[in-house]
Amino acid sequence: MISYEHCPQQVLKVNADLLLSLSVLFEKGGENLHQTLGPFVKSCAAFSDYFKLEKLLLSKETLANCLKADRNEYVLMTYEFNRLFVGPTTPEAPPYESIYLSPDHLMMGEQMLAVRKFYLQENLQTAGKGQEPDDFIATEFEFAAYLLSRIMEVQGAKNDRQIQLYINLYHEFWARHLSLWLGLFARRVCQSTRHPVFSALSEVLDTLTTLNAIKHEGGQL
Amino acid sequence: MSKQLGFLHNSEKCVGCRGCEMACKNEYQIDATPQWRKVFQLREEDFSLPTRMFFSMACNHCAHPECLRVCPVEAYTKRDDGIVVHDPNRCIGCRLCTMACPYDRPQFNPVKKKVEKCNLCYQRIDKGEKPACVAACILGALELVEINDSLDQKTGVLKTLPGLPSPKITTPSIRFIGPKQGKQIRRD
Amino acid sequence: MKLSRRKFLGGAAAAVSSLTLFNFNLLTNSPPASASDPTSETMKTFRNVCPRNCYDTCGMITYVQDGILKKVEGDPKHGYTNGKLCLKGYAYPRRVYSPDRIKYPMKQSPRGSGNWTRISWDEAMDTISKKILDLKKRYGSTLPICLDKYSGNFGIVHYGIEGTMSSLGYTTRALGTPCWPAGIDAQTYDFGTLYNNDPEDMVNANYIILWGQNAAWTAIHSIPFINKARERGAKLVVIDPIVTSTASKADLYIQVNPSTDGALALGMARYIIDNNWVDWEYGRANSVGFDEWVDYIKKSITLDWASEKTGVPKDIIMEIAREYATTKPASMWVGYGMQRHVNGGQNVRIIDALGVLTGNVGKSGGGVNYGHLETWGFNYNAMINPAPKGSKGFIGPDGKEGDRNINMNNFAHDVTAQSDPPVKMLWLACRNPGAQDPDTHAIEKMFASMEFVVTVDSFFNKTVEMSDIVLPATTHFEDWDVMASYWHYWVGINQRAIEPLYESKSDVEIAIELSKKMNKLEPGSCTFPTSGTPEEWLAKEFNPGILKMLGIKDYKELIDGPRKANMPSAAWSDGKFRTPSKKIEIHCELAAKNGLPALPIWVEEMKSPVKYPIRFITPHPQHALHSQFQNLDWMMTTNPEPKVEIHPVLAAQYGIAEGNMVKIYNDLGSITVKDHLTRTTSPNVVVSYESWYKNSNFNVNYTLKATPSDMGKQATGNNGVAFHDNFVMIEYG
């Protein structure tokens, strides 16, 4: 488990970079993997190196190789991305929290409303017309990265109360949301994919989830 | 117990449209697999003519509910009006009730890992509204009734239908009016 | 060290190439007021109307909280549906939030490969527009583009789909209607148009015949009105080859030989004539050809013949003849299933004449009731768009230039047959030919031969599978529209209860986008207006006639509740028939001109070929409306798999037992489906209900030839499909 108290800025940054690159990867879609895969692979390598994660060594290598893919390979990745996450067939692993935590895998469930509430605590809401559900993975990752950036900011300002506030918020967001479904999502991706880049992605997600999972002492957050 | 609420289902009127099943699901936005209310087709072999005959059953809010008796955590309570209520907060998903109920009405939800069942829309009843299934029945085949002698003395009111477990087991609070069959001119 | 956000952004940007991620890409600042608990928002309600191809067209109340549809209910202010829906209606929430819903425009490369790329609306419109312009250039017109649209959504504003095509130029159109045109023509020949009594008027009937009509499954809200009549002692007779749920409630059920209903009616007429229960006064005053028909019956029809033909005992024919003729008023409801035969239209004509014979037409509690379009007199503003200047069209037989019409009911064949110019592009909306058209193999082949296919839909069905581009459709909860019914007399408004999900658009919104792009690429190439909110488009559909009929001054009044059209409860009670002669045309010259018998005489039914002796009837299902609803999770729970109903005697002949998988086949194709042995069918008829099950290739149409029914061309442009004249063999396996 990563502890963010008195955490060096570098830790926060490495984490935030990974979260952001994941957010962009999912948001920009399969059609832009040639742009978004690079930054993801880089931030993943930095993350893996910093925390000395042996678990991710293989994935790191796979991802680095995938970067060398030619145009055709990228096209195949696009098709696979859509088959897994988008449609028009039922996505194998829809990237929305409600799908995993609502019993019948429906969109726009209670979880989405809870996430919306969470964003509003920070005076944030989904941009655009708002028809992309609040619990879209890219949005949740962006929010998590934002919270880390806030920690960094307030650390810089040496505002202890705020530091604690944001650390708690970050932990809470993981505990109440991301931790609960990312693992299931990663597993679904792993089981459904036929392409190494997505297997590697699922490994990264799984590792990220494990590292950010909070152990509750006595049921208290 | 001051009274016993229950259902009266009229197979003579019922066409098996399943509106009651879906209205229940819609009211509580129930998950895909559990069916708190289910429409069953009566076997055509049990009657003189082949017709499509149905009855609809949710929880029977029995006078002697087996579910309540076997539940190890007291997740079931019986109200003063006879409604047997299942409390999901107490439920531990042991499924003893699903095995004990002769009608298979408590449903185990594999995702929530708890049992769920019809609670006779007690929240609606307390507001003076009809249960969602009764309100939805287009043909008036489903009624909310008080199970008592006066009901049982009415002509045509049956305590069971062919194929159902004996009412002596749990004394279910459901009554039926059996199907009627008209004349058929057939080619076989 | 103060790390300002700007500096952090710089840092983040440096670490992640040149992408500026932390400008809150997906999130943005919210107004301070909304920091309060969003779930404390109160529940809002909206009025909607189910826009499906269904008699009942139910009024709905939709509950929305936090912009999410929570549940649906029937609209208590609707006098026909009376606050209740049906099992399909209650399942709507599962449709809106289904994870199966298509979210974005997507492109398949190549078609049929399963390789899908997400594209923006702009790119979709660009690709489509360029294709349209390319075809226009190559062929000198937009005739190579063919539209197939029907009843997926019968909302009036959805006629904007036809409008989309019109605004591009002259195009090829699938003309006609698969379901009910034979009967429409029959009533057109006889009365001038189809027109039924108010179904709520059935309470006044003292005798009711349902003829090939399964209200329990397809028009359940009518049954309480029938029941009210029965409480007063009215007898219900149901005539149907199958003991349906409706037939199960009849006082008298008659298992007529399929497709011989006209013979039964003629037999009844003979007996009525012999006993002089004829309403000569009404018949002679209101019709032409009355005596001529009576003479025909006296000469050519006997009870023996009718009994032999229909399989109905003579004494029963006599019984219902007497009862129908002497119980006043007596109502007949002719179902669409009954006319899905090669002699379907003619059979409806005969039944119409029977109604006239007994003076039941134009009477409250009576009528020969089939359907109506009296409340559909909207502007069709979304549909009417002029072709761009210089558009080349198809010169029709009348010498006028316009769209090229092909037969919707022989779609695969007709599309392929076009040559001058050929059809190269398809646009599908509110239609799923991959599931619903006859001869699925032919449809598949035809699709494969297209250069370009665009489908607008919500779910990944067969048609989408065979498309190049799919455009995500809104559900009716995300649209503004107005809905009439072809059975009851109510009209209701459909409000936009929730914002369109993901990137879905309504068909008019799609047309607007297409028009913008077309005109950008080639100014003047599309006349579809590029402005107007969905509600404004709805408002434009209303005219003084409709407002008067509904007794309102403004369409917004419908938000308070649906309105019943101000019409007499009995069709034709004013005696103002809309035929050329202004009378009921029992002898119909127009029919004769069209190569049909002038009189409602008997026309032979299709006989089963020797090789395929079993009739395969494929009526409408209970759990679905064609390919809609069955794929939803609640529906899959209550009805997990398709079945074929087989009579035990027939099953025994082929060594088939209950629950076996049975192969049903003929020259065209085959399907394999689990059986259920039941005596609700007859020994030479097997029954399976047409529907689209999730993740299943079950489709009865693999075995179905596009055999035309006898009528439909006059009023709807093409003859219908004889769906129930499908003959097969069965075998275990």
Image: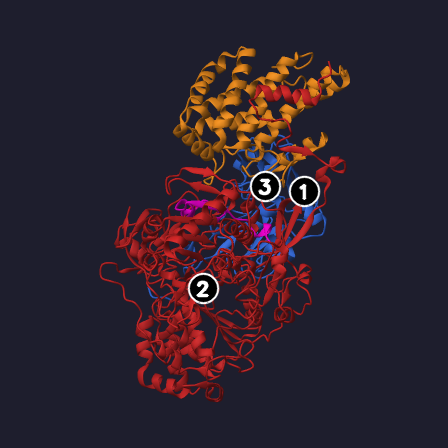
Chain colours: A orange, B blue, C red
Residue A124 coordinates in the image, percent (x, y): 69, 32
The span from disc 3 to disc 1 (Cα, nearest Å) is 28 Å
Q: Which residues are magenta?
A: C457-479
Q: Are marks 2 and 3 in contact (CB under 8 Å)?
A: no
Residue A16 coordinates in the image, percent (x, y): 61, 20
Residue C186 coordinates in the image, percent (x, y): 42, 74
Q: Are marks 3 and 1 in contact (CB under 8 Å)?
A: no
- Residue at the spot of label 3: B117
Number of marks in picture: 3
Q: Is residue C207 above or below residue B20?
A: below
Q: In the depicted view, which residue is nearer to us: C180 or A30?
A: A30
Q: Are marks 1 and 2 on the same chain?
A: yes
Instruction: Point out the frontmost of discs 3 and 1.
Output: 1
Q: Amino acid at mark 1?
A: Asp
Residue C66 is marked as 1
The span from disc 1 to disc 2 (Cα, nearest Å) is 45 Å
Q: Pinpoint the chain carrying mark 1.
A: C
- Residue at the spot of label 2: C247
